[in-house]
Image (cartoon, rainbow, N blue to C red):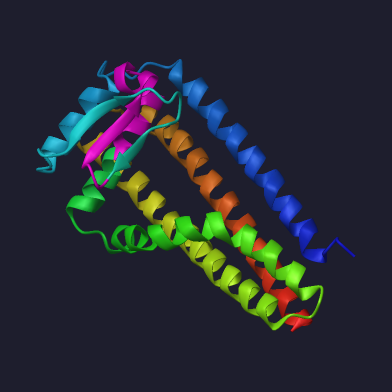
């Protein structure tokens, strides 16, 4: 039987992830049409917040990967902003620029969860790439009752667990970056109290995608553990 009861929950989590991604897109485009009263671009916001926090060595680059490709690269100490965020002065532009700078502030202040996530990254990357292959090979060996198959699946589960742990740690990192972003935008007077609601909607929608993808990964891990446990 190929269908597992856990698949139903995974399907629900997948649906939640699709809904969350749609919500991100809708909120981004909605507030991209609303200009912030400060009339300042995402680039200017990012630079001002960085300088306010003494992060003069962090650079800002324009990303050519399209919308919502914004990120902070701790290895290069660079904030990369997509075109609409880099040069835009909308509520969405300010929210996302400030959020990515929030990660730079975390890095500069040695935020423990960000350091933990960075340390987990190599294992998580290996796990996300190798675990599916190891599961496939292991179950093929299981078909003939091989002890090697048992060991290969165990390694696959361990690697996949590292990837899931990475996603779990990502949640507080992202929420903390959004909290810092909101505080900085208000303290520096880049948004008004009325505009704060739009900032929150953009950032909260983005956070939902992490919650949904993490839930789906956790359910998948539990499914593999349950199947593996029954076949040992």
Q: Nearer the viewer, residue 87 or 125?
A: 125
Q: In percent of the image, x 70 and y 62: which residue is there? A: 136
Q: Locate residue 35, reporting x and y percent.
A: 37, 16
Residue in the foreground of this view, choosing between 34 and 232 = 232
Q: Is residue 193 above or below residue 175?
A: above
Where residue 9 sits: x, y (%)? 75, 58
* Residue drawn at the location 59% of the way across and 68% of the way down: 156
Asked whether residue 189 appears in the rendered view, the answer is no
Quadrant in the picture for the N terminus: bottom right
Q: In x, y percent, where is residue 147?
A: 69, 83
Asked whether residue 117 is in view, the answer is: yes
* Residue 145, quarter of the rendered image: bottom right
Q: Is residue 3 left or right of residue 24?
A: right
Image height check: is 214 above or below 230?
Answer: above
Who is closer to the viewer here, 181 or 120? 120
Left or right: 110, with 230 as reference point: left
Circle count: 0
Magenta run includes residue 98: yes
Image height of 36 relative to 218, above or below: above
Q: Position of residue 94 (x, y in %)?
A: 33, 27
Q: Which residues are magenta?
A: 74-100
Residue farthest along the right direction in this orientation:
1
Q: Quadrant of residue 183?
A: top left
Left or right relative to 21: residue 230: right
Query: From the viewer's perspective, is 184 left or right of 182?
Result: left
Q: Going 27% across and 15% down the picture, which residue do you hit?
A: 39
Please say whether residue 46 is one of the residues in the magenta stretch: no
**Quadrant of the rendering where the C terminus is positioned:** bottom right
Residue visible at 25% across and 52% down?
106
């Amino acid at each position: 039987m190929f269908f597992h009861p856990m698949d139903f929950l995974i399907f629900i989590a997948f649906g939640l992830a699709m809904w969350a991604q749609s919500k991100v897109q809708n909120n981004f485009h909605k507030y991209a049409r609303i200009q912030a009263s400060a009339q300042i671009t995402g680039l200017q916001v990012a630079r001002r917040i960085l300088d306010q926090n003494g992060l003069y060595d962090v650079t800002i680059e324009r990303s050519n990967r399209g919308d919502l490709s914004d990120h902070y690269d701790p290895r290069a100490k660079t904030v990369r902003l997509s075109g609409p965020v880099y040069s835009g002065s909308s509520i969405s532009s300010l929210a996302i620029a400030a959020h990515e700078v929030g990660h730079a502030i975390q890095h500069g202040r040695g935020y423990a969860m960000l350091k933990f996530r960075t340390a987990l990254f190599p294992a998580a990357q290996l796990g996300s790439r190798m675990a599916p292959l190891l599961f496939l090979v292991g179950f093929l060996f299981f078909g003939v009752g091989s002890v090697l198959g048992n060991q290969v699946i165990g390694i696959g589960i361990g690697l996949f667990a590292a990837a899931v742990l990475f996603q779990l740690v990502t949640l507080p990192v992202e929420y903390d970056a959004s909290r810092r972003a909101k505080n900085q935008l208000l303290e520096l007077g880049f948004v008004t109290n009325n505009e704060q609601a739009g900032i929150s909607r953009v950032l909260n929608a983005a956070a939902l995608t992490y919650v949904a993808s993490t839930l789906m990964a956790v359910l998948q891990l539990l499914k593999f553990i349950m199947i593996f446990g029954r076949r040992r």
